[in-house]
Image (spheres, rainbow, N blue to C red):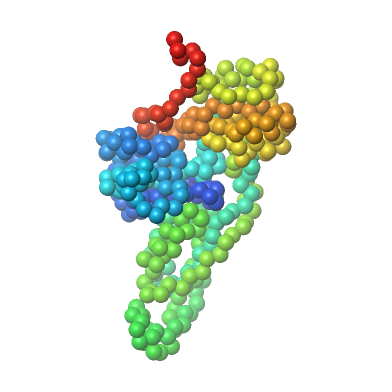
Amino acid sequence: MVVRELLSVLEELAPIHLAADWDNVGLQIGSVESKVSGVLVALDVTPSLISEALQHGCNTLLVHHPLIFNPMKTITDADPVGRLVSSVCFKNLNLIVAHTNLDSAAGGVNDVLAGALGVGDCTALIPASSSSDYKMVVFTPTDSTEPVLAALSGLGCGVIGEYSSCSFRSPGTGTFIPSDEAEPVVGEKGALNQEAEERLEIRVPPAVLRDAVNTLVDVHPYEEVAYDIYRLENPLGDSTQGLGRVGALEDPMSLDDCLAKWSTELSVAAARVSGPLDRTVTKVAVCGGSASSVVDAAINSGADVLVGGEFSYHDYATADKADLSLVAFGHDVTERIAMGPLVVSLTEKLKDRGIEIRETAGPSSSWNWWTSGNRG
């Protein structure tokens, strides 16, 4: 199996179109044609993760948080991110990121978190109400349409719901006059040429738009490729996907009892909490990682409590005024629990491919909780 095929399978679990516009997901380092020897799943790229991957013969890292997030003008060992990027490259590793797309996907981070907390009948706090995908229209010689479609589909293009390699094609005639400096694959220089071509239309997730254009230029036989790109804003109408989740506890209980149960489920010793501990909790909103963006949505949903990874001071102030309790268990804690289920899902989908998918054995971070009880 090559990386292109792994990306296609991952697209089924965490569609790239669900990623936030500001995010950077998908293949960050490597080649879509690189053969996958094994996949190591973790929250972040660290030096120890790279060592662990090499130890177990895994040449592909699948992480939640992007290593390359902001534009990089240089890649040197003078910069911590540059050192990691260089290490991934020099060790011939592939790096794939599933971040906000995995957060929002059905069965992703927020569904796993809700399940661990005993929250059922969930819907998205902020449903994925519109698509920020693009449509690529390209004109190809009739015998080149299939290779172009296969290459673009391998990047995760052409996915609509549970269907992949979705496209539309229509026949036509392309005309062109090559100049004396041109090197046409077909046709005569200085003459009006007419060639049988097909118009191929396919959806392109924003995270792979640049790769899709580059791949198109590489695969297409013409010296000059004719293509158009359109921005789509199609309603999705799917309340099961999007930011956060909100649902109900099977048995209402006090916030204090919730905290005792939840801390056990998440294997964490402390949490930052607002609101009275004796309040009865029935409706619960959740959002793994940074949950500031869903505070208003949680208030509007009528939830008694919003459980997240972290909140700002102003989030607590806003929630307090609206009688919404906030519970912060830690950014990594609320996301780490989804890595195991991701490994299980990928393993099931790839069970006939002979590829080992494993979760990192190391900690997700080098920091921990401190309480006065630690002093002995």
Q: Going by the image, does 323 lie left or right of 219?
A: right
Q: Kindly give the residue lying farthest to the top in the view shown.
A: 376
Viewer-nearest residue: 259 or 33: 259
Q: Measured from the top left, where is residue 213 in percent x and y? A: 44, 63
Residue at 62% across, 57% down: 233
Q: Going by the image, does 149 lie left or right of 185?
A: right
Q: Measured from the top left, where is residue 112 in percent x and y? A: 53, 32
Count of numbered circles in the view: 0
Q: Kindly give the residue lying farthest to the front in the view shown.
A: 78
Q: Measured from the top left, where is residue 273 in percent x and y? A: 61, 24
Can residue 242 be seen here? The reply is yes
Q: Measured from the top left, where is residue 286 in percent x and y? A: 60, 32
Can residue 110 be seen here? The reply is no
Residue at 57% across, 19% down: 261
Residue 47 higher or lower than 274, as above or below: below
Residue 263 higher or lower than 185, as above or below: above
Residue at 29% across, 36% down: 51
Image quarter of the C terminus:
top left
Residue 346 higher or lower than 7, as above or below: above
Viewer-nearest residue: 191 or 121: 191
Task: Name the image quarter holding residue 321.
Answer: top right
Q: Kindly give the residue lying farthest to the bottom in the view shown.
A: 191
Viewer-nearest residue: 211 or 168: 211
Residue at 34% across, 51% down: 75
Task: Name the image quarter holding residue 155.
Answer: bottom left
